Image (cartoon, rainbow, N blue to C red):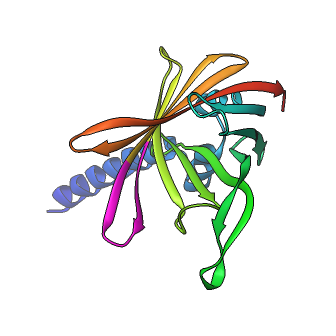
Amino acid sequence: MATMISLATLICIAFNGAAYAQASKQPDTMTQLLDYSRPGAAHDELEKLAGTWSFQDAELAFVKGTLVRKPIYNGRFYSVEMTGGKLPVPVADGKMKEEFYQSMQIEGFDNPKKKYITTSINNHIGSDIQMQTGTFDAAKQTFTYEWDDELIPGQIQKNRRVLTINDANHYKEEFYEIHGNEFVKVRELDYTKTTGQ
């Protein structure tokens, strides 16, 4: 009986020792939190878009303006501010006010989810905060984002934004909406870099 207990005890000790050795090889929680918080190669793709850009609608000459994209928090995220032409915007008490079109975005890459994320707000249409989720095709140098809008209760619109880097100084954005059962392009903006970061 004593021999059996001793054998069982030895097996238990050996098992626990092996488990401990395996666990000790795994990074601790804080190390993982820090490592998953760092900017990496995926963020480098966003870096290519940093700087000041002029933009122009491919068809509508009056749709034009400037966009400034800057790295923040050591390149972990990018802030984007866009300014366009004047237009009437809705304000309180049912009134309208003429202002320059403005939008703000935060761009980043979610390391655990392995997805590009953009949040977007503007001063024209919509009280929502858009949450766009996307991927990057290195061969085509293209970001593709998708999201749903519900600008009027119960009316959900599926959207897609395709951003293609043409070269170091030019890129374009194509915007699509679901009409019927397929995405239809509703706008194209062409960007030209005017200064660096």
For the N terminus, which image quadrant? bottom left
Q: Which of 125 and 60 is in front in this view?
A: 60
Picture layout, residue 150 above or below residue 132: below
Q: Position of residue 132 (x, y in %)?
A: 48, 49
Q: Where is residue 96 in the image (x, y as percent from the top left)?
A: 66, 72
Occupied quadrant, residue 92: bottom right
Provide the major secondary structure of the magenta segment: strand
Q: Where is residue 135 in the image (x, y as percent from the top left)?
A: 45, 34
Q: Where is residue 28 in the image (x, y as percent from the top left)?
A: 56, 51
Of all residues shown, which one is farthest toward the left?
1
Position of residue 3 in the picture relative to residue 113 (left or right): left
Magenta region: which residues? 146-158
The residue under the point 63% across, 23% down is 171
Position of residue 150 in the picture relative to residue 53 (left or right): left
Whether residue 50 is visible to the viewer of this picture, yes or no, is: no
Please say whether residue 154 is one of the residues in the magenta stretch.
yes
Q: Nearer the viewer, residue 100 or 7?
A: 100
